[in-house]
Image (spheres, coloured by chain):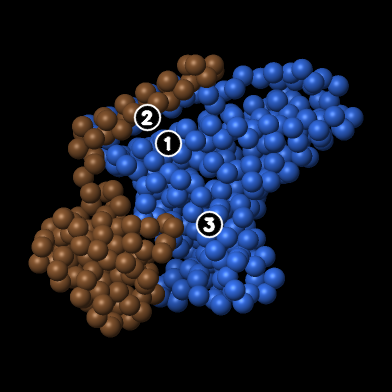
Amino acid sequence: MTDQITFPDIVSWAVPFFIAAILIELLWIVIKGRGGRYETRDALTSLIMGAGNVASGILLGFIAYGFFMALWATTPLDLGTSWWVIALCFVLDDLRYYWVHRFGHRIRWVWASHVNHHSSQHYNLTTALRQTWTGTFTFMMIVRAPLILLGFHPAMVLFCGGLNLIYQFWIHTEAIGRMPRWFEAVMNTPSHHRVHHGRNARYLDANYAGVFIVWDKMFGTFVPELEQEKPRYGLVHNLGTFNPIRVAFHEWVGIFRDATQPGLTWRDRLMYCIAPPGWSHDGSRDTSEEIKRKHLAHHPEDRGSPGFSATD
Amino acid sequence: MPLGILVPLVIAGIAGIAVLLHILGLSRPATLASEDAARTAWLDEFPDDPALRIVLSHDHTAALIETRDGHGIVWPMGADTTARYLTGARIERTTNGLRIDLPDYTAPRIRLRLAPDEAELWPHLMETPA
């Protein structure tokens, strides 16, 4: 079994490209007067979150890597490092990303880590870098276990994950409208991902894809961007601070405060940790389903249109 | 990439982009053009509890909202706005207006820039039963 395989740390090598692309998008917006918005403190917060994400990877990455190497030591399978194995690993890791991302929106414990990526009311290339500091604590590295056990080397799996992250950088923009029809059909694009970042009732819990939008189409979570309904970005309840520490940890603090309230059953405490965001023991808050139901109560004409069920 | 290159690159990149944005005039806070804009901004955060009364600050940077469930504030978050109820708020006068401390980890402190007469009046309005 091969243990000594190395792949380049492509995310850190992509940093100069990230900076250059942000400057190009910014200049495009300023010169053309369209294609998105920038604001100083919002962008600064996003960039600091990105730097913190890299730092947390350096500090805590050994936990996931140690877990993967322990799995690698137990599996009898080794698929090697030929190009088709890397390509297959990339596709399967993207399927893994789809499910981790979906869990990230449907399980509050995982949302606590992912929420900061959605906490900007802007949608530009700096938003792409507004990444979590606390991903290790979600334990979502478990979802990668099947790939390792099937014989994909951990270094290769992490390399493919890095490629996935770099792909997703360019789709965080309003400067690109629609890509060619064939590309929109298969790949995740700025249009598809704008929907994912929308806080409109129609767009909640949609388009979880990383690279290939086909996963959303296969699993019933695809919603197209509608010309008549521009996405409004941010959270259902937007933050009132740019402090990166609060951005990074606010949902964890929320879970702690909710789950330790006096007078709750143990089931309630557990549900505050793992139920979908917006769940509450007394029904005082709204989940995305409740937000959609309320929207349809006011706009019954939207029933059955993209993002809304025909029957609820 | 070696940390000796990555760290300076990240620091210079972040600082450079922030300075450039500021020089380009992209640090201006949002303003609320009218009471309707404040009403919409409030509804964006609390769609189930519409504003019954709105007091817009003279410079249009904040709005005091009265609703069925209590009082709230709409204020700028960069080029956008957000809103919170004033439940549990501690309110203090500052040289430029008011400072509101909330028991809310996601919005612990709101600094409102108000004219002296507004800074005098708003705390009383905030305490008036809705």
Q: State the residue at coordinates (15%, 71%).
A: B121
Q: Residue A157's spot in the image, x, y percent?
A: 69, 30
The amino acid at mark 3 is Val
- Cβ atoms under marks 3 and 2 closer than 8 Å: no
Q: What residue does disc 1 label?
A: A48
Q: CA distance from mark 2 to mark 1?
A: 7 Å
Residue bearing the label numbered 3:
A253
Per the rendering, the colour in which chain A appears is blue
Q: Quadrant of residue A148?
A: top right
- Asked if residue A123 lies left or right of residue A259, the reply is left
Marks 1 and 2: in contact by CB < 8 Å? yes
Q: Residues within 10 Å of mark 2 (few under 14, many from 20)?
A: many
Q: Which chain is brown?
A: B
Element type at mark 3: helix
Q: Is residue A27 above or below residue A195?
A: above
Q: Secondary structure at mark 2?
A: helix
Q: Quarter holding the C terminus of chain A? A: bottom right
Residue type pointed to by label 1: Ile
Residue nearer the viewer, A301 or A43: A43
Mark 3, Cα crowd under 10 Å, few <14 / some 14-19 / many 20+, is some
Are callouts 2 and 1 both on one chain?
A: no
Task: Tell me residue A307's x, y (percent).
Answer: 50, 61
Which residue corresponds to mark 2?
B14
Picture quarter with the N terminus of chain A: top right
Residue occupying the point 80% across, 21% down:
A3
Three-letter amino acid code at the position of disc 2: Ile
Q: Residues within 10 Å of mark 1 (few under 14, many from 20)?
A: many
Q: Using the numbered discs, state the Cα–Cα distance from disc 1 to disc 3 in whole angstroms.
A: 20 Å
